[in-house]
Every structure is written in structure tokens, then in C-alpha cells.
Amino acid sequence: MKGEKQMNEIQTSCASTDRKWNTWESIDWNKCEMAVNKLQARIVKAQKAGKHGRVKALQWVLTHSFYAKALAVKRVTSNRGSDTAGVDKVKWSTPKARFKAIGELKRGGYKPQPLKRVNIKKSNGKLRPLGIPTMKDRAMQALYLLALEPVSETTADSNSYGFRKERSTGDAREQCFCVLAKKASPEWIMEGDIKGCFDHISHEWLLNNIPMDKVMLRKWLKCGFVFNKELFPTEEGTPQGGIISPTLANITLDGLQTMLAEEYHKKFVNRKTIYYPKVHLVRYADDFIITGRSKEALEEIKPLVVDFLKERGLTLSEEKTKITHIDDGFDFLGYNIRKYKGVLLIKPSKKSLKKFMQKIRGIIDSNKGSKQESLIRLLNPVITGWVNYYKNCVASDTFRKADYLIFEKLWQWAKRRHPKKGKYWIADRYFTRVKNRNWCFVANFKKGKTDDRIALKRLYDTKITRYVKVKGEANPFDPEWTEYFEKRKTYKMLQSLNGRKSLLYMWERQNHLCPVCGKPIDKKHPWGTSQQIVNGKKVNFLLHDSCRRKVIQTKKM
């Protein structure tokens, strides 16, 4: 009775619908986001206070809110998978269908359909099974994920970085550097590999430990899949391909860091000597490393990890789980991490470079008859993506090598097109001097009535920049961390050309003045970006740090 009363109070205090919105185009998305963010912040507050009943009640309100349902439909219809239908072959491709779908997201009478099973190739040549839910099932998962994420972020391991908001592989890489770079740092690393993590998680464990609606979770876990027109049941694992699956897997593996910290911590021996086991965990989704002071110490830790995983229905791969010395190096998330004469260097791995060049060569080989301009437009996005991933590590030599390999392939491509022409003619036809550099792959073309040209991106031109790791305890759903994430946003904008242009535009738009205090924004006082609502729309402003704190405090009140 008490729980029902509490839920009713919350429901009446939070409006869930807006009757003014009767079409997809009329929905105020800023209002939706603000309403959902407020509820998520309340869930975080309740979770931190240990009020699990209130958490459950707030999750119920959120999953029954019009705002959250609208955002869930928007998410599944605006991502890359929106053109791929499930077993029912239904796509929400029109605004009318999308708005209708909002009203169909109801808990009562909901029954998920089986997943459409497809196999995709892994980098090692093996097949990875992927399940494709229907659009409605995707939207329902996205809806309940909005309620689950604030809880999972609050309880997550501080050194877990995969499939989490405001975290990336860059943060995992920097944590590896923090743990391994010093002279006194651990020298032995255990590379963990879990056999089919998503496919083997125990349903019983998930139902007993995941803080969400158990009825809905059970339905998704037991929905089965269709392969070659045959229905198969699912007795274990999460629906791989489902929107909620990565978060379920993260929650499953959370607690490993706490378990290791409790078991291996600083100890005083004979009241004077300090024993420090140097045990650290860095995890990205189901990939993780554990450090230790010796090989023997990691051999002792391994059974503990095995038992931890066994409880959750998972097993550690004996073949792929290795114990390596830092001087020999190891690969993690596409990086090679190794010490050279006591200096830790993080470089792009040889496997990653090989895979990148295979993709580049494949594009060039499949466009033997294409225009030079077309080829450059196909290659530049691939090069940019790879470069951006590695621009924060020791990658200059690798970039130079990749540039040379690409040049060799392009020279081969050019010579094939003109077998009867000399090398000087070919070089003059396809390669140009730009500023002080020769052999630039440049294409001239007409843009309207004017002449224009496009050049192939050179990897070595990329500036290697420093990356600042996110704080382990930072929670993007907690209002207490709002200022921190706004500062990170400003820093990231300053690191890129487009970001700096955006900041300059904001500065000029505000006439170089802070909109709160009216004083100039200059080098003398620290400043940053802040998002404000103006006429129902989100607008970015430049504020002094002190003014921004005042705004955040006002919002909290």
C-alpha cells in the first residue's frame, strides 16, 4: 500500500503527456529530453540514497511517460539500423507511423516477437550471431533502457569504459597508461577473454540481479530467434543486437573490480613494511586486463575471476587468456601497449594497421575504372576515421608508414590505367605539388562554373594531441557532475578546428560578453560552454566558470 501511494504521488507530480502534440512534427524534443533527464536525475538521487522502492517507482513513471516513449521511438528510427526490419518486416519510415508507434508502446499485453538471426563475419574469419528485433521491440528496449541506465551508471565499476555514456576506448587506453607507465608500476598483465559473453549469461542471474521490470526482462530473454525459417528457444544469453543488451552485459560484469579490490589491497607486514599487490582492472565491455606484481600473483587471481564468471554463467577462454610481461607488450582495443627500456609507449597495433590497409586496398581495387575525384571521396572518410581513433597515442611512425603503403597502391592504380604512358607523364597527371610537398594525390574538377580540387588526406599531417581521461566516478546522469562534463565538452571543442570555429561563433554572437554577469569573456577569467533553454530550444552559450556554477545551483534549487 505504501509503495502504491508513493507511485501515485510521483505520477501526479510529473505530467506524462502533452495533448497539444498530435503529430510527429509537432513534438517538442527539447521538452521531452528535459522531462526525461529530470526523472533520470531523481532515479540517481534515490539510488545513491539506497531508496530502492523509490527507484522502482520512478522507473515505472519514466517507462509510462509520453516523453520517454517519444524519445525511444526517435532513437530507433534515426539510427543506422532503422532500415532493417525484424521478423514482422515492419519499418516505421513515415512520421505518421512513428507517432502512432508512441501510443503502441504499452506494457500491458506486450509480447516480444522472436529475433531475426543473421551471422556476420568477425576479424578472425569466424561468424558472430546477431539477433535483429522488430521495431516495436527495439523501441520498448530503448524505453526501458532510459530507466535502467541511471541505475547502472551509479553502481558501475569506475574502470569500466565500454558502452557507457561519455566514455570511450580513449579513456580505457589512458587508464592503462596511468596504471603501467611508472617505474614502480606492475610489470605483468593478464589479458582476459570471455567465451561468447553475450550468448552465455545466465538468465537466472539476470532476473535476480538486474534492477528493472522483471516481467519485461523475462519476456526479452525468452523470446527466442528465427534462423532459416525455424524457431529456436533461448535458454541463456542476452538478445545480442538488442539495444539494452550491452547495458545488461555491463551490469553482469560489474563487481569484478570491487571483488579484486577487497581481496588485493595494501597490507602492513610487521607494522612497517607495506605489501602492495599492484592489482588493477581495466575493462571495456567484455575485454579486460588485470595487472599484478608477478606472474605467480596473476595465476592466483585467475581462479577468482573464473569463479566470478561461473556464477554468472560465463567462462574464461583458456586459449585466449594470456599472462604477458610489459616488456613483451600486449594488444588491447586495437592498441599495442609495451615498455621500451622502461618507457611505456602506446601505439596502433600491427593487426589494426593490416586491417586498415586491407580496407584501403579493397576500395582501390574495386574502383580501378573510377575517376580520381571519386576514389579520393571514397578513401578520405576511411582515412579520417582511422586517424581520429589513433591521434591521441604514439602514432606518427605508423601514420608515415600507412601514407607510404597507400602511395604505393595508388601508384600501382595509376600505372594500370595508362600502360602505354611513361612514369613522368603519370606522375604529372595524378600527383601535384602542394605548398612544399610533392607527390600529393590531387584531383581537379568543376564545381558549377568554377574550377576546384580535392586532395587525398595524408595521415602524417594529423597532429598528435593529448587526451584527458574521464574521472572514474563521474556520472552523466547525476546533476552534481554537470559542470564537470560541460568543462570536458569545452576542452574537446578546443581540440578540433570545427569546435574552435563554434566557440568563436558563440563569442561573436554574444558580443564578447557573458550573458549572466555582462562582463567580457577573455583570457583573464576562466570560461566554458553551457547549454540553456531559450524559447523552448537548446542554445549553447559561453559563460564564466563562476557564472556557470551560479546557473547550475539555481537549476538544482
Image: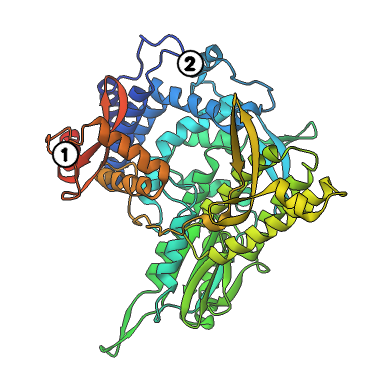
Q: Mark 2 points at which residue?
A: 103
Q: Pinpoint residue 241: horizontal percent, then vertical percent.
A: 61, 39
User: Residue 511 occupies which quadrant of the picture?
Assistant: top left
Q: Pinpoint residue 11: horizontal percent, then vertical percent.
A: 30, 23
The residue carrying pointer 2 sits among few (fewer than 14), some (14 to 19) or many (20 or more) residues within 10 Å by Cα, namely: few
Give the secondary structure at mark 1.
helix
**Rendered view: 332 above or below 369:** below
State the mark number for residue 372.
none
Q: Pinpoint residue 370: horizontal percent, then vertical percent.
A: 76, 38
Q: Name the residue under label 1.
A: 553
Residue at 64 percent of width and 27 percent of height: 83
Tell me which amino acid carries mark 1.
Answer: Gln
- Closer to viewer: mark 1 or mark 2: 1
* Quarter of the figure that contains the C terminus: top left
- Disc 1 to disc 2, C-alpha distance: 36 Å
Tell me which amino acid carries mark 2.
Answer: Gly
> Is 234 in front, or is 340?
340
The residue carrying pointer 1 sits among few (fewer than 14), some (14 to 19) or many (20 or more) residues within 10 Å by Cα, namely: few
> Is 380 in front, or is 307?
380
Q: Residue furthest right?
A: 420
Residue at 11 percent of width and 36 percent of height: 517
